[in-house]
Structure formats: C-alpha cells, structure tokens
Image (cartoon, grey):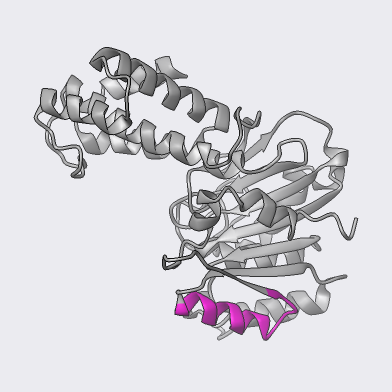
C-alpha cells in the first residue's frame, strides 16, 4: 500500500491534490492499511531528518529545509515540490496515527475491505457471520462517519461486528437512492438485505451521522432492524425531505411505524452544545420511543461532531456496545 501511496503522491502537482489523496485514503482504508502507511511515513521521515525526539522537532527541521511554516495550512494550488510533499505527508501521518492510537490498541483491527457496489463497502475480518452483528453505516456529506473510516473501525471489535458503509456522492441524504442499488431511498433500502446477506447475521443494526442520521432510522423501521443510532441527524420536519405531494420524513416514519413488525431500539446522539441537533433529536423522540444521548466533554464545547470527543477518549466501541451493538434482545 505504501508503494501505491508513494507513486500517486509523487504525481500530485499541488498540495490540494495531495490532500485529496489523503481524504480518499481516510474514507476507504482499513485500519491496517492506514496504520501501515502512516507509520512508514513517520519512521522514514524521522530517519531522513535525523530527528529522534518529539514530532514537532521533526516538523521544525523540515520546515527550515523547505521554507514552509508547518503551522499554517498547505492547501493551495501552488506547485508542490518533493520536500513540500514530504512535509504535508508527515503532518497528515502524524494526525492520522494519533487518531488511530486513540483506540488504545496495540495493533490495528483486522478488517478487510470488499466493494459490494460503487458506493457500498463491507469491512469484515472473515469470521462466520452467524455469531456477529452487522452494522450498516449511513455516512454524511463528507462520505465518512464524522472521522476517517479506519479510525471509526479501529474503535470496534472486528470479531463481534462487520461494518457496511454506504456513501452518498449526490449529497441528497440518500433521498435519490444509490447508484446500482436503488433509484430512491425505499428501493435502495429494499435491496440491502440481499446485497449484504443480512439473514446470515445474528442481528443487523443501523447507524447514521449527520445527513445519514435520518436514513439510518428509516432503514431500521423499514427493514425491521434490531436497533438504530442517529448522530447529529436531521429533524423529521426537515424541508429537504418534502415531496411534491406535501409528504415528508414525518409521514415516512409514520407509515414505516405502522408497517413495522417491531420498533427498533433507537438512540439519538447529539453534542451538548449543538442546539439545532438537540432540537432535531427531541422532535424525532416525540414520534418514536428513543433514548437521547447528549455528548459532553469537560472544559470543551461539543458541537455537531458528537463522535469526536468519544473518539478522542477511545469510547466509541464502548458506547456502541452499550447501545446498538448490545445483544440484549438476541
């Protein structure tokens, strides 16, 4: 993987292009892939600059060599040089590995990636599905679960759960479906059980962040899933969900609730300081039985990205195992 990274990075003519490469890697890589890439970049850059102390010292050496102040963003259209790419890669690798290390694990979780459809990926360790839970993740506008996909996966237990990540490049909140899956939200959801072999799992749950929050709830209702979690999701009265006939998300929820054989356990997560997300969660709770889960962090505000403080504390896995990944109803 590092050879591919080096080959593509060397072809990046600007820092923006290199940043795009990093974003693609963050959104698709497994923990092992991102772990190995970041570790290799860090070790060889320190060797090259002959720095054995703190990361900041290594960056200072590189900055003096290249004339670039590493404390300012490098995202420009200015021509990239070999040395400027080295600085930018080192900054990215440092940040990335720190996020992976927040999981407090000595080794990366052994997830393997497989492509189910163009914008649908499955991460699994290859062990039998019959004893595992499938987590179906609806990513937001950034095509991730509020953090690099590998960082999210690193905080889970690959022996207990497989993870399917759905992406919405159209940024329509999945209302226009997914390419080669379904042309509408309803048809897309109906296609998922067969595509993801849901019947082979002990149970299936959904989780969505931001624009993916409400679709995750609708998926749980329509597919009779065990549980669902929305993190910073939209209100059931969000005007973007309004149809020409006047119906909206509230009507979809009402219909799904009436047709559902059982209601899923529902968890609504929001940052303590995000008034809009709290309001959205309370409006959804008024329609469905749900547990409100405000996220706080001592001495710091928690806004829309409510998973960030949980990630920093290595608490995402624990939070999910105490909620949607709980086997209490299996």
Relative image position of residue 328 (x, y in whole percent):
87, 59
Quadrant of the image occupied by residue 158: top right
**Res 27 seen here:** no
Relative image position of residue 288 (x, y in whole percent):
72, 80
Query: Which is nearer the eye, 147 or 9?
Result: 147
Query: Which is nearer the eye, 63 or 74?
Result: 63
Relative image position of residue 99 (x, y in whole percent):
47, 41
- Magenta segment includes 77: no
- Horizontally, residue 253 falls left or right of residue 97, namely right
Image position of 173 with respect to 272: above or below? above
- Magenta segment includes 288: yes
Q: Residue furthest front?
A: 53
- Tell me what residue is drawn at x 43 percent, y 52 percent: 142
Query: Which is nearer the eye, 213 or 53?
Result: 53
- Tell me what residue is drawn at x 24 percent, y 17 percent: 49
**Res 29 seen here:** yes
* Quarter of the image with the C terminus in it: bottom right
Q: Residue furthest right?
A: 330
Q: What segment is highlighted magenta in the picture?
A: 275-291
Q: Residue furthest left?
A: 67
- Tell me what residue is drawn at x 38 percent, y 31 percent: 93
Total numbered badges shown on the rendered structure: 0
Relative image position of residue 291 (x, y in whole percent):
70, 74
Dominant secondary structure of the magenta stretch? helix
- Horizontally, residue 305 falls left or right of residue 259, namely left
Image position of 270 with respect to 307: above or below? below
Image position of 22 with respect to 298: above or below? above
Image position of 6 with respect to 242: above or below? above
- Tell me what residue is drawn at x 19 percent, y 25 percent: 62
- Horizontally, residue 47 falls left or right of residue 68, namely right
């Amino acid at each position: 993987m590092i050879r591919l990274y080096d080959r593509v990075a060397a072809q990046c003519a600007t820092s923006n292009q290199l940043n795009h490469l990093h974003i693609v890697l963050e959104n698709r890589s497994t923990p092992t892939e991102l772990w190995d890439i970041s570790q290799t970049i860090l070790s060889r850059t320190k060797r090259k600059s002959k720095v054995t102390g703190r990361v900041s010292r290594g960056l200072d050496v590189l900055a003096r060599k290249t004339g670039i102040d590493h404390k300012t963003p490098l995202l420009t259209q200015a021509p990239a040089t070999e040395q400027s790419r080295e600085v930018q890669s080192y900054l990215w690798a440092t940040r990335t590995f720190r996020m992976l290390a927040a999981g407090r694990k000595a080794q990366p979780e052994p997830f393997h990636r497989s492509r189910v459809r163009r914008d649908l990926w499955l991460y699994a360790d290859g062990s039998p599905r019959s004893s595992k839970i499938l987590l179906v993740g609806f990513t937001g506008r950034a095509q991730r679960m509020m953090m690099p996909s590998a960082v999210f996966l690193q905080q889970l237990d690959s022996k207990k759960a497989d993870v399917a990540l759905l992406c919405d490049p159209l940024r329509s909140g999945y209302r226009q479906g997914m390419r080669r899956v379904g042309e509408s939200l309803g048809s897309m959801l109906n296609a998922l059980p067969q595509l993801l072999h849901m019947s082979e799992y002990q149970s299936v749950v959904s989780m969505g962040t931001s624009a993916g929050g409400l679709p995750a709830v609708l998926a749980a209702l329509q597919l009779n899933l065990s549980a669902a979690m929305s993190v910073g999701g939209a209100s059931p009265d969000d005007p973007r969900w309004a149809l020409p006939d006047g119906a909206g998300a509230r009507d979809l929820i009402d219909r799904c609730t009436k047709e559902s054989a059982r209601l899923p356990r529902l968890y609504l997560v929001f940052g303590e300081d995000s008034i809009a997300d709290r309001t959205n969660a309370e409006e959804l709770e008024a329609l469905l039985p749900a547990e409100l889960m405000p996220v706080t962090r001592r001495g710091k505000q928690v806004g829309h990205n409510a998973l960030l403080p949980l990630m920093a504390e290595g608490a995402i896995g624990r939070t999910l195992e105490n909620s949607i990944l709980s086997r209490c109803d299996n």
